[in-house]
Image (cartoon, rainbow, N blue to C red):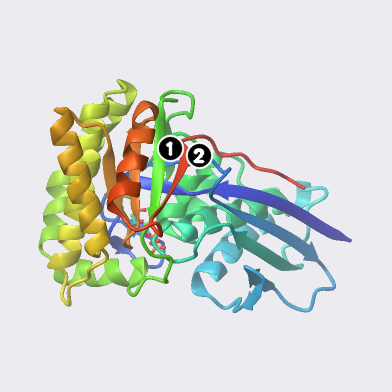
């Protein structure tokens, strides 16, 4: 007998960045973080999982190419799911046996590893699909913990709207979970523009980069202990109050500090390039010209810009981008909207 499930999961873009782990195995962060979950229309991961007793081994295909199933992160997810499935086995009618082998097919409809949070959508999707297949993960909070052991930022893609990942304190990671702050209907005026500056694979992965940062940067400790806790409070209040001025300022400050921390790392990590810096400059001047913040940039571990902005400013900002940057810098709009699973 075979069991199969297909899901899609969206990308999330952090406005308070996760950067640095206190536990590499369990993927426990040194600071809390917060993101908006994007609509799945433009960017998503889509994953099908199938379990059968007669499959010879577990296997995975990413974007049509078979990859190693031995990837430790993938193994973390499979192990944790099977552990839960084994504990529940007696009353899980219609679920595969934990011993059945599983085949996984996943596709992203956007550039992988170009700093566009592909691992977040990918692991959120994989874990959500496996949890459905094995009928485990009774609450979404539980599913966020399973996604976290695949890739930290993935835990935030389990919810739509605005989502915080609470760093937690427990050594076993039991309180390091993602929670929805407000849902996707709370602030419908906000849109996201993604400016694809480069779709090349990034030179330093987030995982390796943040490890070197924790080992070598003194600024990151200051950030985690003294800066982020207050910012988390302030940005959540701004989101609840739909206060774009405060939201935008904190978003840009946090992106700037994240990249300052990367530069404080030794050897230094540079994710931004001249086009990225040009976009920062353009939006800084645009906001100054308007006398208030009208559009807020943020950059993850790559040169691509993500701009959060009220819908009424989208046309103006897209026109500015078209005017000042080469046509290759595409602007794709996406609403901040919710997570939606599509079981087969
Ligand atoms: C800059 O979640 O990709 O996008 O936990 O090692 O898989 P691992 O790292 P990952 O790091 C994301 C870093 C970031 C900021 C963020 O999304 O919060």
- Is residue 83 visible in the rendered structure shown here? no
Tell me: residue 263, above or below residue 296.
below
Q: Residue placed farthest to the front in the image?
A: 323
Quarter, ligand 1: bottom left
Question: Which picture quadrant has residue 61?
Answer: bottom right
- Which residue is situated farthest in the top direction here? 241
Q: According to the image, label 1 marks what residue?
A: 179
**N-terminal-most mark, 1 or 2:** 2
Which residue is at 77% across, 63% downward?
51
The residue depicted at 21 percent of the width and 32 percent of the height is 293
Within 10 Å of disc 2 (Cα), the crowding (few <14, some 14-19, many 20+) is many
The N terminus, quarter of image: bottom right
Q: Is residue 235 or residue 152 the one in the foreground?
A: 235
Q: Position of residue 330 (x, y in %)?
A: 42, 53
Q: Position of residue 32 (x, y in %)?
A: 29, 46
Give 247 or 54, whichever is nearer the viewer.
247
């Amino acid at each position: 007998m075979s069991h199969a499930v297909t899901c899609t999961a969206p990308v999330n873009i952090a406005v308070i960045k996760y950067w640095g782990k206190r536990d590499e195995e369990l993927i426990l962060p040194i600071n809390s973080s917060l993101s908006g979950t994007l609509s799945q229309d433009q960017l998503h991961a889509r994953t099908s999982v199938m379990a059968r007793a007669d499959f010879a081994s577990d296997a995975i295909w990413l974007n049509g190419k078979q990859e190693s199933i031995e990837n430790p992160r993938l193994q973390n997810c499979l192990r944790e799911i099977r552990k839960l499935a084994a504990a529940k086995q007696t009353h899980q009618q219609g679920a595969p046996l934990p011993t059945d082998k599983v085949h996984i097919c996943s596709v992203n409809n956007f550039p992988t590893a170009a700093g566009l949070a592909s691992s977040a959508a990918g692991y959120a999707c994989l874990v959500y699909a496996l949890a459905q297949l094995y009928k485990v993960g009774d609450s979404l909070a539980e599913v966020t913990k399973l996604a976290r052991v695949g890739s930290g930022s993935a835990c935030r893609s389990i919810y739509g709207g605005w989502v915080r990942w609470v760093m937690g304190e427990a050594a076993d990671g039991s309180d390091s979970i993602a929670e929805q702050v407000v849902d996707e209907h709370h602030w419908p005026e906000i849109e996201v523009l993604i400016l694809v500056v480069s779709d090349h694979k990034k030179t330093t992965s987030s995982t390796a980069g943040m490890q070197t940062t924790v080992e070598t940067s003194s600024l990151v400790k200051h950030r985690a202990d003294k800066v982020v806790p207050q910012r988390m409070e302030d940005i959540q209040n701004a989101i609840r109050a739909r206060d774009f001025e405060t939201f935008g300022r904190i978003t840009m400050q946090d992106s700037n500090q994240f990249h300052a921390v990367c530069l404080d790392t030794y050897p230094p990590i540079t994710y931004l390039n001249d086009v990225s810096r040009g976009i920062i400059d353009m939006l800084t001047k645009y906001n100054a010209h308007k006398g208030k913040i009208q559009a807020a940039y943020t950059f993850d571990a790559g040169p691509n810009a993500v701009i959060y902005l009220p819908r009424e400013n989208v046309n103006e900002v897209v026109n500015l981008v078209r005017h000042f940057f080469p046509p290759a810098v595409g602007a794709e709009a996406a609403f901040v909207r919710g997570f939606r699973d599509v079981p087969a």
